[in-house]
């Protein structure tokens, strides 16, 4: 693409003597830190979504409609194991980012694969929990409590699913192109997203499961 040259208007002899300013849009497609700012804005919008879901659960979490309560349904041992899987995935993602800083492609891919494994374990246990609850008759239609529970926890699980898909696609890109600037920027965004999901899950574990068994 040819350079775009801007010629100041002839507002006088002084303005005519100003040097021409050149722009290079072909070589500067993104403003500096523009991607990070845009992704932070996305995360803030996601915060609003989860805030609304937490507020809904706070209102409906005790509306059992003569059905089972959280204390009767929740298996804290299973949830604690699931929480450990997600927290471990956050740690291994941190190791992947350290390998990225050292431009170690193989090390980055290995730790991303470990992160994906823990993420799959988390998702598998969550699906098992849902299937077990439904088998017991604790479906979303049973009570407002269960509707709010499945919506909140299921939305988080859906985010983890999309995160895993993103992780696999990014691993393919890194394997194909290496740790180029674009892939490092994508890794940074995925890292923020993954750690954000960990923070949300801590809220779910505390607000839904721990308080639910009290």
Image (cartoon, grey):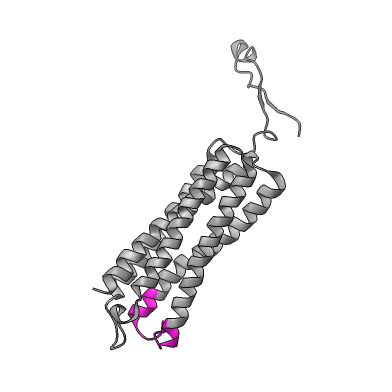
Q: Is residue 170 left or right of residue 144?
A: right
Residue 118 on the magenta span: no
Residue lying at 31% horizontally and 64% vertically, measured from the top left: 206
Q: Is residue 194 visible?
A: yes
x 37%, y 86%: residue: 142
Check residue 143 for magenta coloring.
yes
Residue at coordinates 64% horizontally, 56% vertically from top-left? 169
Q: Is residue 123 left or right of residue 141?
A: right
Q: Quadrant of residue 48?
A: bottom left
In-image side of 42 versus 138 (left or right): right
Q: Quadrant of the C terminus?
A: bottom left
Q: Relative to 138, say whether 173 is above or below.
A: above
Res. 42 in view: no
- The quarter of the image holding the N terminus is top right
| Magenta-tinted stretch | 133-149
- Image location of residue 92, percent across then percent down: 50, 51
Position of 154 relative to 68 (above/below): above
Q: Residue furthest right?
A: 2
Looking at the rendered structure, the number of numbered marks drawn on it comes to 0
Q: Position of residue 108 (x, y in %)?
A: 59, 46
- Residue 21 in the image, given as x and y percentages of width and height: 64, 22
Pick the front one: 106 or 30: 106
Residues 153 and 136: in front is 136
| Spot occupied by residue 175 in the image (x, y as percentages of width and height) | 69, 49
Using residue 143 as the reference point, say whether residue 15 is left or right of it.
right
Vertical side of 172 occupied by 159: above or below: below
């Amino acid at each position: 693409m040819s350079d775009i040259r801007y010629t100041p208007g002839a507002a006088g002899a002084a303005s005519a003597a100003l040097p021409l300013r050149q722009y290079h849009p072909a070589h500067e497609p993104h403003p500096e830190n523009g991607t990070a700012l845009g992704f932070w804005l996305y995360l803030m919008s996601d915060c609003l979504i989860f805030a609304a879901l937490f507020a809904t659960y706070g209102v409906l979490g005790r509306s059992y409609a003569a059905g089972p309560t959280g204390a009767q349904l929740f298996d804290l041992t299973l949830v604690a194991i699931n929480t450990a899987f997600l927290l471990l995935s956050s740690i291994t993602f941190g190791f992947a980012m350290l390998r990225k800083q050292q431009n170690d492609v193989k090390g980055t891919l290995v730790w991303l694969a470990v992160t994906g494994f823990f993420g799959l374990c988390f998702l598998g246990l969550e699906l098992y929990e849902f299937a077990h609850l439904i088998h017991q008759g604790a479906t979303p239609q049973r009570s407002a409590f269960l509707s709010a529970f499945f919506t909140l926890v299921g939305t988080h699980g859906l985010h983890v699913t999309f995160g895993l898909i993103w992780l696999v696609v990014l691993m393919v890109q890194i394997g194909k192109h290496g740790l180029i600037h674009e892939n490092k920027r994508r890794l940074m965004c995925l890292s923020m997203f993954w750690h954000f999901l960990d923070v949300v899950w801590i809220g779910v574990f505390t607000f839904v499961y721990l308080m639910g068994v009290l």
